[in-house]
Image (spheres, helix red, strand yellow):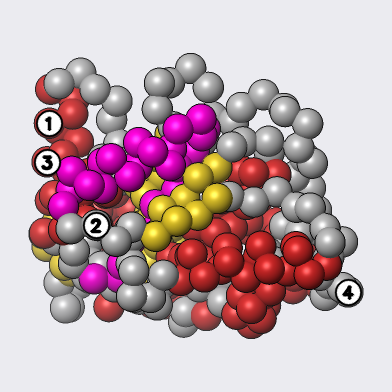
Amino acid sequence: MTETRPHRITFANEKGGTGKSTTAVHVAVALAYHGARVAALDLDPRQRTMHRYFENRVETLQRRGIDLPTARCEVFRGDTTDQLNAELARIGEDADFLILDTPGRDDEFARHAATGADTLVTPLNDSFVDFDLIGQVDAETFKVRRLSFYAELIWETRKARAMQQRKEIDWVVVRNRSGHTEARNQMRIEKALNELSKRAGFRVVKGLSERVVYRELFPSGLTLLDKGHLGELGTSHLVARQEMRALLAGLHLRLPEKRGAPQLELA
């Protein structure tokens, strides 16, 4: 990597239940499988879902005596954004990527992490309840009426960065659980997202479907990427791994040259 600091990927959504932490963990592990050095910081000391996932992963690797690519993960417990900046500098030292998982609520540190991201990932379930986070639609026509406060914040930050000739935020809205949405509603959401993306400047990428396997993997800390350690995989699991490969490709991340780590095979 040629940058002086790691590429920061912030997973942020002010609504919970969107698969944010699960997506963050899988992206972090996928990057590690590509040979990247990955650090992670959980900004939710109450829930600390991402941190607990990686704790479970470490315990499983030790218990089974196996070595799999992973990320080093810590929890932020500070009181100021200056402390957050210092923590990011410390844990991001020598890392290629720094993954930040934010709380599912409006939070000072979540906003700071979002506006300081190189890649901002906002997972959304395919529903207008979640869509309301980034924009409001007309009740009759489902046309976008206005940007939300959150979208305005990111829009203004991107403009300010452009004026300062700094690297622009690549904002990616990830559509999770789209397979469980009624077809007509799914089309309405897709149309509204495409319209809003032109106004707010984000890209739309298909994410992870609703699958029981993600909840089942949490206690072990394993991911769908840990081929050979998950037992017999059904067809749905294989499809989910293809979804993960498509999601990683859609993030357009610059991967480091191979460092001897196992290369990612999702097929």
* Residue at mark 2 to residue at mark 3: CA–CA distance: 26 Å
Q: Quadrant of residue 9?
A: top left
Q: Which mark is residue 78?
A: 2
Q: Please state if 143 lies on the left or on the right of 59 as rendered.
A: left
Choose between 69 and 199: the one closer to the eye. 69
* Residue at mark 4 to residue at mark 3: CA–CA distance: 48 Å
Q: Is residue 239 visible?
A: no
Q: Which mark is residue 232?
A: 4
Label 4: which secondary element: loop
| Residue 2 on image: x %, y % | 48, 17
Label 3: which secondary element: helix
Q: Which mark is residue 156?
A: 3
User: What amino acid type should be assigned to the residue bearing mark 4?
Assistant: Glu
Instruction: Please give the range of residues in magenta.
Output: 80-105
Q: Nearer the viewer, mark 4 or mark 3?
A: 4
* Residue at mark 3 to residue at mark 1: CA–CA distance: 6 Å
- Badge 4 or badge 2: first in the primary sequence: 2
Q: Please state if 234 lies on the left or on the right of 18 as rendered.
A: right
Which residue in the structure is indicated by mark 1? 160
Q: Looking at the image, do the residues carrying marks 3 and 1 touch, with CB atoms under 8 Å apart?
A: yes
User: What amino acid type should be assigned to the residue bearing mark 1?
Assistant: Ala
| Residue 161 on image: x %, y % | 18, 29
Q: Nearer the viewer, mark 4 or mark 2?
A: 2
Q: Looking at the image, do the residues carrying marks 2 and 3 touch, with CB atoms under 8 Å apart?
A: no
Rendered residue at 48%/65% (across/down)? 50
Rendered residue at 79%/41% (across/down)? 262
Label 2: which secondary element: loop
- Badge 2 or badge 3: first in the primary sequence: 2
* Residue at mark 4 to residue at mark 1: CA–CA distance: 50 Å
